[in-house]
Image (spheres, rainbow, N blue to C red):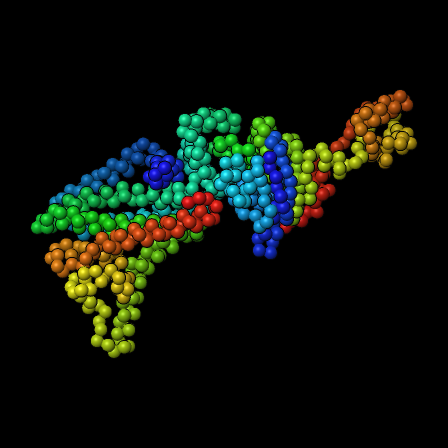
Amino acid sequence: MTLWQKWIVSNPVFRYHFMGQTRMLVRRPVWQVAFIAGTFLAVYLWFLYQASQHGFPTVTVGLECLVLWLIAPLMTHSLFAAEFEKATWDMLVLTRLTAGQIVMGKFLSRVALLSFLAILFVVPLWLGATKEYQTVPTSQLFVWLVKTQLVSVGWAVLLIAVTLWLSYWLKRGMVAAAVAFAGQVFALFIVPILWGLFFALFVASAERSFDPFSFDFGQGEWLSYGWMFDIRFAVWLYNPAIALVGIFALLTESQAEKPILWGTWQGLVYLLLSGLIVSALTKAVARATRKPL
Amino acid sequence: MLEVKGLRKEFGQLVAVKDICFALQPGDIFGYIGPNGAGKTTTLRMLATLLEPTAGTATINGIDIVRQPEEARPLIGFMPDFFGLYEGITAWEYLAFFAEAYGIPARERKQVIENVLELTDLTVKRDAYVETLSRGMQQRLCLAKTLLHDPLLLLLDEPASGLDPRARAELKELLREIGAMGKIVIVSSHILPELSDFCNKIGIIEKGELLLWGDVEDILRQLQPARLLTIRCLDGAEKLAEWLSKQPEIVNVQVVNSTVEAQFVGDDEAQAELLRRIVLDGHRIATFSETTMNLEDVFLRVTKGEVA
């Protein structure tokens, strides 16, 4: 059995969380569904029209990040916690599903829903970008689009993995969601600010002629590949918001001045971290339930 | 066959289950009785492979539940006392979810689901959303789910708690049917009347210790060596009591509210003979009955009311 079959096709956990739960949202009176769907469609079409007329790729990416990064913990927080809170976990454990099927079924169901949301943003983003950056070659614009999605979706996938992990260990959905949001605010805003203050204090106390804020962004040897492994600036370089700002800034720069793999690398790191977290979670579930991986 | 050998569970300093041993055969319905906190649920969770014992083990058809939990699980059906159902799906979809999760082949699933729905009288509710079902129906749906993979051992933890009298009666009937299918059923409860009708074996646990277990009739005989006869005589209880006190098989006799209560040692033949002699002696007997101990009497006699 291939992993595709094991985790998705022959995995009832994936199907329940992807289709079964989603269907609950549309189990409303027809007029309500029609009203919500109609309103959404109207807003979306208006948004597409505005993007094609005026561009605003930055607004679209900002909106995409806001939606994906808010919704990722919200749609994941109860995946494990609800099993404990509603006492369905024991019944799931006694089935022949492997730990991998349980964890990956939950994880991939959310990644699939998230990808669907991301696709909704890709269309206006592409329309807006082709309007805004008319001088940029299409191939370069396409790479730029892929990078923005790698960072925004990659970070959201990381949030899903972290929230899933929290949901399993904390066993309380709302607590998991709260910790995930707090952690995100901490990683996106508080840690970069604190790290900057620390640097400033360090420079002032050591009386050195070193300004941590004046590193040559886009120039020199540091920029080719060294930035990827520079721990001093990791909290900024791996901040998805800063990564996205960089992607926009570098779009119109000449090739020689660009740090290599900017955006792609961050996105891959987020995905790699997600994989590690999900893998650790699968092992923890297998150990706790005495199930095979 | 289920063999439980020295099963023990410790939570830190607390010994929740103390080296319990018992064995059950297919068709046995085992009433696992004990007060709240006695260790019933812990035992069942260990047998269900959900909790690893500190010591001891159990085998189902020779498969060790501690060493081979994955092999044992297909043979086990467990219905916890507190359970939930996945919401947003119909009863049929719920069962289809578990049928697939239990690895029942796709071509057999439809028939299996129809069978368990019929057994649990839920066929009419197949398209109802699970959250709209009553508590009793949800209990039956959970039982249907537990029966999907045709387990040999059924572990039911307080299955009748929260059910109304009619739902309890239906559940009893259903459990009788399941027992007749040759499965080993372990039903834990602290509500004794609900067990007395259909269990052929019982075990009494208190403070983590299995105080006794075995056939219900054997236990009753053990705990009540003399039969208690209650006789109502139209000619006066005192006269009959005096006559009975002279009979060799009567060990004790007393008059309670113009009825004679006599402790009698002997089998059914001897009991019939005694009745014949009473009548031949000229006593006019209105009622002659044997009062047997029920599970509640057994439970109260054996336990001290302590928890682990």
Residue A288: x percent and y percent?
47, 48
Q: Position of residue B218 (x, y in %)?
A: 72, 34
Please name whichever residue, B284 or A242, is drawn nearer the observer in this view of the structure.
Answer: A242
Q: Is residue B94 left or right of residue A217?
A: right
User: A284 and A166: which one is in front?
Assistant: A284
Q: Residue lying farthest left?
A: A135
Image: B281 above or below B39: above
Task: Report the number of numbered marks.
Answer: 0
Q: Residue at x 48, y 46 (%)?
A: A290
Q: Position of residue B281 (x, y in %)?
A: 90, 23
Q: Residue furthest front?
A: B62
- Residue at image point 60% right, 56% down: B13
What residue appears at the point 23 percent right and 58 percent down from the top-left corner? A242
Q: Is residue A273 above or below residue B182?
A: below
Q: Residue furthest bottom?
A: A207
Q: Quadrant of the N terminus of chain A?
A: top left
User: Measured along the vertical axis of the image, is residue B173 above or below residue A206?
Assistant: above
Q: Position of residue A12 (x, y in %)?
A: 39, 36
Quadrant location of the C terminus of chain A?
top left
Against A176, residue B166 (above or below) is above
| Residue B246 shown left or right of residue A276 in the figure | right
Residue A200 makes an appearance in the image: yes
